[in-house]
Image: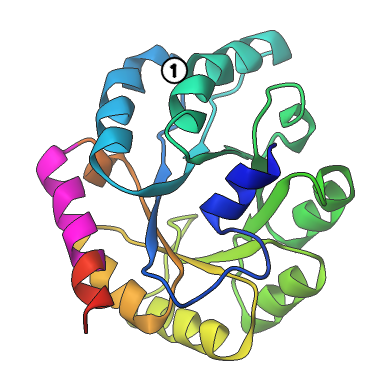
Amino acid sequence: MSQNRRHSAGMGPHASRMGPARLYLVTPPLGDAGAIADALADALNAADIAAVLVRLEDGDETALLERVKTLRILIQSNGAALLLDGHAGLVARAECDGAHLTGTDALRAAAPGLKPKYIAGCGGLGTRHDAMLAGESGADYVMFGEPNGRRPSFDAVIERVAWWTEIFQVPCVGYAANVDEVEALARAGAEFVAVDEAVWRSPASLRAAAERLAAELVR
């Protein structure tokens, strides 16, 4: 990926915490990428989006690359980083900006092929120890609160975000299950707030999320 886009996304290990939190969009698992293209374009045009995490349904490599191609220019031309959920081996061929890996084993396996040119983010971190291992293994960001299996309580997610951002320099993504969680995650210190299609497919919800991040900036 271009270094300019990586730096503008602010997802590297030295990202500044002086600015406002930014939105990080998460797609549903995609079998037909074109089905979300219009709604995604509207979201990218309506708010400051740092990154889009593209999740893919199973398929052969050719099909996966075609789905990413459908969305790549749309995402990157709007200044957002395009990340694949897993599929680290496709990042370079699909001209993406990086990959999101679930768990420290996946991160350690993929990081040598991604860094330093591409972003290697990590989620699925069930414990503080897991999060620290991710940081030590070169994660460009860690994610807390994503709904993989049983999501912890929101209070627990907030506690983890606050703990991480107080101690560590690696940026943090807090996953908001709804608009009401966005501001609290930003207040806890998350540099990025992830929202899925339940938020970004709705113009009113996306606008509310962006407004809550802006409101946190002026506190």
Q: Secondary structure at mark 1?
A: loop
Is residue 22 shown above or below 154?
above
Counting from the top left corner in percent of width and height, residue 54 is at 51, 34
Considering depth in this image, is 22 or 8 the residue closer to the camera? Answer: 8
Please tell me which residue is depicted at 65% across the width and 38% down the height of the picture. Answer: 97
Residue at 33% of width from left, 22% of height from top? 36
Residue 91 in view in this figure = yes
Left or right of 24: which side holds 205?
left
Magenta region, main secondary structure: helix
Tell me residue 27's x, y (percent): 41, 36
Task: Assign the C terminus to one quadrant of the image.
Answer: bottom left
Identify residue for label 1: 33
How many marks overall? 1
Q: Which residue is rendered at x = 62% and y = 63% of the image?
A: 141
Q: Amino acid at mark 1?
A: Ala
Q: Position of residue 206 (x, y in %)?
A: 20, 47
Q: Is residue 201 above or below residue 107?
A: above
- Whether residue 180 is visible, yes or no, is no
